[in-house]
Structures are given as structure tokens and as C-alpha cells.
Image (cartoon, helix red, strand yellow):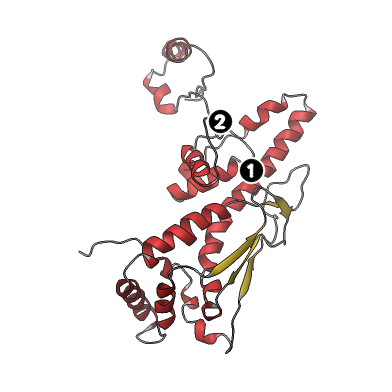
Amino acid sequence: RKKKTMKSAVTATDGYKVGHRPQYPEKTEIVCSNWTPRGVSYMPTTPRNDDKIVVFGLQALCNTYLIRYWNDTFFCVPKVFAVSRYKRRIDSYLGPDVITYEHIEALHDLGYLPIRIRALEEGEVVNARVPIYTIENTLPEFFWVTNFLETALSCLSWLPMTSATTARKYRDLLDYWCDRTGGDMGTVQFQGHDFSFRGMSSLESAAVSGAAHLLSFVGTDTIPAIDFLEDHYYACCEEEIVGCSVPATEHSVMCMGGSDEDEEAETFRRMMEDVVPSGIVSIVSDT
């Protein structure tokens, strides 16, 4: 059995892109692309119901994908291995010698991605159909790199901005009704609590989406979201509330206490008097 290695960044693209370099017109030197959300038509309807997008996730994307991932799986790998690995994959995918590989060798020789990104500030709230960021190549011979990266950039940009925008919508809804009903506005930041971890597609997506949610709230059960914000956005849980929760039970805990009326009452008493005798405790009550 072959030893498994980390998937190479140079194959993290749509299959149709690998042969695009010779398809561009001769003398192409600069390719500039943009990432632009088209709208919020599938978002929750709220009293403010504006067509706004929350900018979030690009700094982490640059750190984890454009720098670390490319270095670990391509630039810091011996050239003969990095290129032969790519050639093996594409020859088996498109057929032998359908494309050439000199441009991949040249990129490895260069040792970095020759691109420039211009972006709106993270945390900004902007209109839909406004470019969030643009990307272009900085060396003319690497014009093909811009849109070679498009697939992964789009993949990695969608979730944080969608989750951040969704959270803003729910925060708007909760603020509106808290104000209308005379509630304490200071409690709203805890009310849109994030329990989404178990429903996400991966540990990484849970951290990204959970971090985006924390732009509008502080209540979360997605602990890796706090790590994400400290790793990429200079948050510090010792100096500010990044994300928090309270001691809580779950159905398995409540079931183990017994199901008849007296046993259930005793379980409640034990949780409130013995286990968490002061402060807040959240108790599952529908078991």
C-alpha cells in the first residue's frame, strides 16, 4: 500500500483549468479576476432586509491556503517529486502528453505565488454585486496563475462570508424584536448561540463558519471557532470575550438519572444544587 501524502495544492483546481495556459491569446501578460457575491436572495428576511454582504475570511485564506498549503505541498517539496506527482495525476486524467509541464516547473523554480490581492477590509458590510477582492499576477510569464487559483479561492471564500452574512441577518432580527419588546439589548449577543458544529462538513468548515458567526454573536458551542480567530485575527480570549457558553447538560445525562417523575426531579435538583451550585446552568428539559 502506498504511503498517503497531503493533497498537492497544484491539483486543487477544476480539471478544465489545467490546460488553459496555451489557450490564452499570445502576448497575454496580466490577468485580473474578482470575487463578487451576486446577492442575498436566499438569506433570512429581516426588518432591515438590506442587500448587504459581510466581508470575512480572506486573511485566514491567505495564511492557510496561499502560503502554508502551497509551501507544504509544492514549493517546499523537491521539484522532481512535485512536478512528477502533478504529471502523473494529469496524464492519467487527460491522457499522456495532452499538456506540457514547463510552466509548473517554472513556478516551482520561482518559489512563491506571483500574485497581488486587493481586498475590502474584513468586517466591512458592503452591497451585493460589489467585488470583495481582486487577484492578478505580478509577473507576465505567470499570467495563467490568476485563474488557476480561482477554484480554490471561490471554494474557501464562500463559507465564511455566507455564515458571517447569515449571522448578521439573525442579529438584526433579534435586535429588532428585543427593542420592540423592551428587552435587554445586552443579552442579544448571547441569544443567537451556535450549535452548528455537528452539522458541518468537516472540522475545518466548523471552525471557519463558527468564527464567522462570532462576528455578530459571542454565544457558541463551536470551540474551534475561538481557536480560528486567535490563530488568524489576533483575538485573545484573556483580553476580550471571543466566544463563550455556560455549563449545560445533554439528553444522555438527563436520561441516565431515570425517567419517572421523582427521578427526574432529583436529576434537576442534583444539577442545580450539587453539580453547578452557582451561576448559570442550561438543562435539557424535553428528555
The residue lying toward the viewer, choosing from 266 and 237, is 237
Amino acid type at mark 2? Glu
Q: In front: mark 2 or mark 1?
A: 2
Which quarter of the rendering shows the N terminus?
Answer: bottom left
Q: Are marks 2 and 1 in contact (CB under 8 Å)?
A: no
Q: Is residue 166 visible?
A: yes
Q: Position of residue 193 (x, y in %)?
A: 58, 34
Neighbour tally class for label 1: few under 14, some 14-19, many 20 plus, Cα within 10 Å = many
User: Would you name the residue on which mark 2 appears?
Assistant: 239
Q: Is residue 138 left or right of residue 206?
A: right
The residue lying toward the viewer, choosing from 181 and 280, is 280
Q: Which SS class for mark 1?
A: helix
Q: Position of residue 25 (x, y in %)?
A: 59, 88
The residue lying toward the viewer, choosing from 82 and 286, is 82
Q: Which SS class for mark 2?
A: loop
Q: Quadrant of residue 262?
A: top left
Q: Single out the residue that lies furthest toward the left.
A: 1
Instruction: Give the number of callouts.
Output: 2
Q: Is residue 127 above or below residue 49?
A: below
The residue lying toward the viewer, choosing from 98 and 100, is 100
Q: Residue at x 35, y 75 (%)?
A: 83
Q: Position of residue 91 (x, y in %)?
A: 35, 81
Q: Is residue 52 visible?
A: no
Q: Quadrant of residue 69?
A: bottom left
User: Would you name the residue on which mark 1 appears?
Assistant: 167
Picture disc at residue 222: none
Q: Is residue 182 above or below residue 170?
A: above
Upstream in sequence: badge 2 or badge 1: 1
